[in-house]
Every structure is written in C-alpha cells, then in structure tokens.
Image (spheres, rainbow, N blue to C red):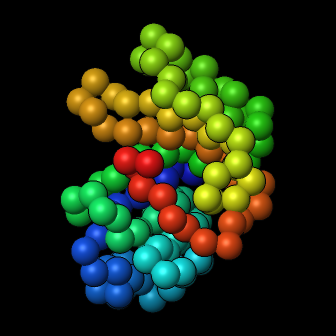
Amino acid sequence: MKRIQIHVSVGDLAESICFYSALFGGIQPTVRENGYCKWELHDPEVNLSLSQHLVPSGVDHFGIQVDTDEELTEVCRRFEVAEKTRIVSIAVGSSYGSENRSSTVDPQGVAWKTFHVRDAAASFDRSRGD
C-alpha cells in the first residue's frame, strides 16, 4: 500500500492540531511530540505531518509512504524516470527512526520524498533544510 504524505510547517502547532482534528472528524494525531504531530488516516488515506520548523510556514514537502522495501524501490525508479536521475539522497536511518528513503525536487522546486519506516524514533527534530 502506498499513502500520500503531506508535511506542513506551521507557526502555531496547537492551533493547527485543533483545525485538522476538526477537519478529520475529531480524530486526534497518531503521533504527538514537542513541535511535531502526525495523522496516519485511512479515510482519507493520507499521512499528514505538521511541525514547527525554522522554515516559512506552508507546505514543506510531499511524500509517498510505502510498506515495503520493494515498494520503495519502485517509487525510487519513478523518481529517476520523472527527474532523469535527479535523486537527492537515499538514506538508512534518520531522526524519524529506522527508515529507508529517497528524495527529489520537482521542476518548480517542490520537495518530494518516498520512505519506508521500520520503527518510530523517540523524537522529531529535522526540517527540509536539514
């Protein structure tokens, strides 16, 4: 299964949690930490992450969350085709936990990543600029 991820940088996390919880029918974030929260919803099928970054508020990046390394490889190949091998990085392990990921940037400068999370990290502490 592949799930679209949207990561938004916000100025006031508590206010944004109230807004999105109401938008999602009262569902609270799946993960809630200092400066970060995330919903992994099934209706709509989306991973929405919010964080307070040192970057301007707004969409930080889009992503495609996958369940297996095989799906990750498939999406990485799509990145290569779309961007003519303009892959920015492939990493194992991150501040998010044990994660394989790859990222690219579209022609307008919008960041995209694909990732497979194996286990969650204790805290969130990175921005797109990192």
Q: Is residue 11 left or right of residue 68?
A: left
Q: Residue at x 25, y 74 (%)?
A: 11
Position of residue 14 relative to residue 116, above or below, is below
Position of residue 97 relative to residue 10, above or below, is above
Closer to us: 121 or 42: 121
Q: Residue at x 51, y 23 (%)?
A: 87
Measuring from the top left, give residue 24's x and y in whole percent: 42, 78
Q: Is residue 46 left or right of residue 128?
A: right
Q: Residue at x 42, y 55 (%)?
A: 127
Q: Can residue 66 be seen by looking at this rendering?
A: no
Measuring from the top left, give residue 84's x and y in whole percent: 45, 11
Closer to us: 60 or 92: 92
Q: Residue furthest top?
A: 84
Q: Residue at x 34, y 65 (%)?
A: 53
Position of residue 28 relative to residue 59, above or below, is below
Q: Can residue 77 be seen by looking at this rendering?
A: yes
Q: Quadrant of residue 10?
A: bottom left
Q: Quadrant of residue 74?
A: top right
Measuring from the top left, give residue 46's x and y in whole percent: 51, 59
Measuring from the top left, give residue 16's x and y in whole percent: 32, 80
- Total numbered badges shown on the rendered structure: 0
Q: Quadrant of residue 22?
A: bottom left
Closer to us: 76 or 21: 76
Position of residue 94 relative to residue 107, above or below, is below
Q: Is residue 114 left or right of residue 12?
A: right
Q: Is residue 10 left or right of residue 69?
A: left
